[in-house]
Each structure stands twice: as structure tokens, then as C-alpha cells.
Image: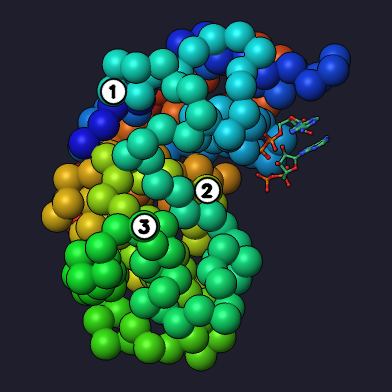
């Protein structure tokens, strides 16, 4: 698993300080949640962590090395599964898409292993539109896992599914994390969700200082 360290991250758009002086750690092998209200800078911070955008100041280190572009070993799952899967590709090809340059046999075994991990073994021949929203989100998670990431980053992963599916997907994530021992970073605006999922919570406030707080979660999981 990987450790992520943010030091003095700020991002300024024109005169708008989207985030200001965020220092926080995402410890290896744990679930860390970034929580905050809309406009607090979650998306901005996530884009910087994933190497999609550069901070105005500050640095992010991934396993000790400064981030420069999307780091190897980092996989992302987005909120909007309906737009993140290719509708014209079957599940197997969707999950194998990031691995399309590796040997076919190896690719197939990694795809099957990832589908197994998310409870979708046997569904590889379906198209995304033949599946429920929750199943499609599992496919998106399988696609990330097939890359064997050291860090799994999820942006509002359950925002587009109903409450029951969401509870199932939350438990699935905890199972995957415990089995595969990967480092997981989840962004959400939902306090309940962050308390349920997290070993460690980073709070982004809307206060002018926008200083982050790190709260170790001491609640026992069910
Ligand atoms: P959250 O994801 O927590 O809702 P965002 O990171 O989307 O917060 O936004 C934080 C602040 O930065 C908001 O005031 C938003 O309008 C501003 N912002 C985000 N992206 C841009 C951008 N590309 N250009 C200008 N302002 C932006
Ligand atoms: P979230 O769903 O996390 O709140 P937003 O809807 O605020 O995200 O932002 C979606 C995208 O729009 C992000 O890429 C963000 O950087 C960009 N964005 C947000 N606010 C602005 C803004 N004021 N000007 C330009 N781009 C923005």
C-alpha cells in the first residue's frame, strides 16, 4: 500500500482561493475520507492529488516521490459511473481497458480476479446498460482494481445510487480494502458515510482559513 503526504497545498483561481494551506497525510493501508460541504475544495484537492492539476503552492508526495502527472499505482473511481464506462463494450472489455497493452491471457485473469472481488463473476459478457446502477459502479471499481493499484481514489463514489445499494457498496469497499490491503481515499460531502468508512478523516471547512483538520476515527466497525 501507498502513503500520500500533502504539504501546504493551495490552489488559487484568479482571486478565488479554492483551497488554502492544506497539510494532511493519507496513511498506507487505511481508508481515509476527505469530507466537506459543496465548494469546500474537495474536487480541487482531488485533482491535485491525482496529478490532473498543479497546485498554486505546496506539494504532494506519493510513496516519498513528488507527484508529477498521474502517478503509477494510483487508480480512480468517479461518481458518474454511467459516463465512466464505455456503453459499447462488454463488462470484460470495460474492466480490461486499462490493461489493453498487456498479454491477453494475463489480462483475462486479472479481469476475472477483479470481477470476482466485486461480486460480479459470471457477468463479464453483459453490457453496462443491461446492469443496475450499483452493478455498473462495481464494474468501475473492478476496472480500478484490475490495475492492481497501491492507492484507490474515489470521488463521491456512491452519490448516484439508492440508499440500499450504497450501503452494500460501502461494505464491499471495506471488504476489498481489508482483503487487498490497499490504501483508499474517498471524497464525500456525507458525514455519516465518512464516519462509517474511515480510519482517518480529513475535514475541509468553508471557514476563511480553510485549514484542514485530521481526525483519527476511533469508532469500532461493525
Ligand atoms: P467541492 O468539490 O468541495 O464542491 P470545488 O473544488 O469544486 O469544491 O470548488 C472549490 C472552490 O473553487 C469553489 O469556490 C469553486 O467555484 C472554485 N473552483 C473550482 N474549480 C474552479 C475552476 N476551474 N475555475 C475557477 N474556480 C474554480
Ligand atoms: P462537485 O460536484 O465536487 O461540487 P463541481 O460541480 O463544483 O464539483 O465542479 C465540477 C467541475 O467544475 C470541476 O472540475 C471544477 O474544477 C469545475 N469548476 C467548479 N467551479 C468552477 C468555477 N467557478 N469555474 C470554473 N470551473 C469550475
Choose between 59 and 71: the one closer to the eye. Answer: 71
> Which mark lies nearer to you, 2 or 3?
3
- Quarter of the image for the C terminus: give it: bottom left
- Quarter of the image for the N terminus: give it: top left
Q: Residue at 45% x, 48% y: name it.
A: 76
Vertical comparison of 207 with 77: above or below: above
Q: Which residue is tagged 2?
A: 155
Q: Residue at 67% x, 26% y: name it.
A: 206
Vertical comparison of 54 with 99: above or below: above
Spot occupied by residue 141 in the image (x, y as percentages of width and height):
38, 62
> Secondary structure under badge 3?
loop
In which image quadrant can residue 96 be found?
Answer: bottom left
Q: Which residue is tagged 1?
A: 63
Q: Which residue is tagged 3?
A: 101
Q: Can see residue 159?
A: no
Q: Can see residue 26?
A: yes
Amino acid at each position: 500500500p501507498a502513503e500520500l503526504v500533502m504539504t501546504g497545498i493551495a490552489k488559487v483561481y484568479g482571486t478565488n482561493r479554492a483551497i488554502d494551506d492544506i497539510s494532511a497525510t493519507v496513511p498506507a493501508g487505511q481508508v481515509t475520507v476527505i469530507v466537506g460541504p459543496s465548494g469546500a475544495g474537495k474536487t480541487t484537492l482531488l485533482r491535485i492529488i491525482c496529478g490532473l492539476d498543479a497546485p498554486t503552492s505546496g506539494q504532494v508526495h506519493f510513496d516519498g516521490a513528488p507527484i508529477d502527472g498521474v502517478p503509477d499505482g494510483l487508480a480512480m473511481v468517479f461518481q458518474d459511473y454511467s459516463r465512466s464506462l464505455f456503453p459499447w463494450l462488454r463488462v470484460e472489455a470495460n474492466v480490461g481497458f486499462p490493461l489493453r497493452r498487456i498479454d491477453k491471457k494475463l489480462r483475462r485473469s486479472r479481469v476475472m480476479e477483479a470481477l470476482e472481488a466485486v461480486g460480479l463473476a459470471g457477468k463479464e459478457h453483459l453490457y453496462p446498460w443491461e446492469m443496475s446502477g450499483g452493478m455498473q459502479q462495481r464494474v468501475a471499481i473492478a476496472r480500478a482494481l484490475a490495475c492492481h493499484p497501491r492507492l484507490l481514489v474515489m470521488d463521491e463514489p456512491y452519490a448516484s445510487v439508492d440508499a440500499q445499494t450504497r450501503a452494500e457498496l460501502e461494505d464491499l469497499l471495506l471488504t476489498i480494502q481489508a482483503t487487498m490491503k490497499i490504501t483508499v481515499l474517498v471524497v464525500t460531502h456525507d458525514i455519516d458515510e465518512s464516519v462509517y468508512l474511515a480510519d482517518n478523516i480529513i475535514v475541509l471547512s468553508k471557514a476563511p482559513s480553510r485549514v484542514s483538520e485530521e481526525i483519527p476515527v476511533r469508532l469500532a466497525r461493525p
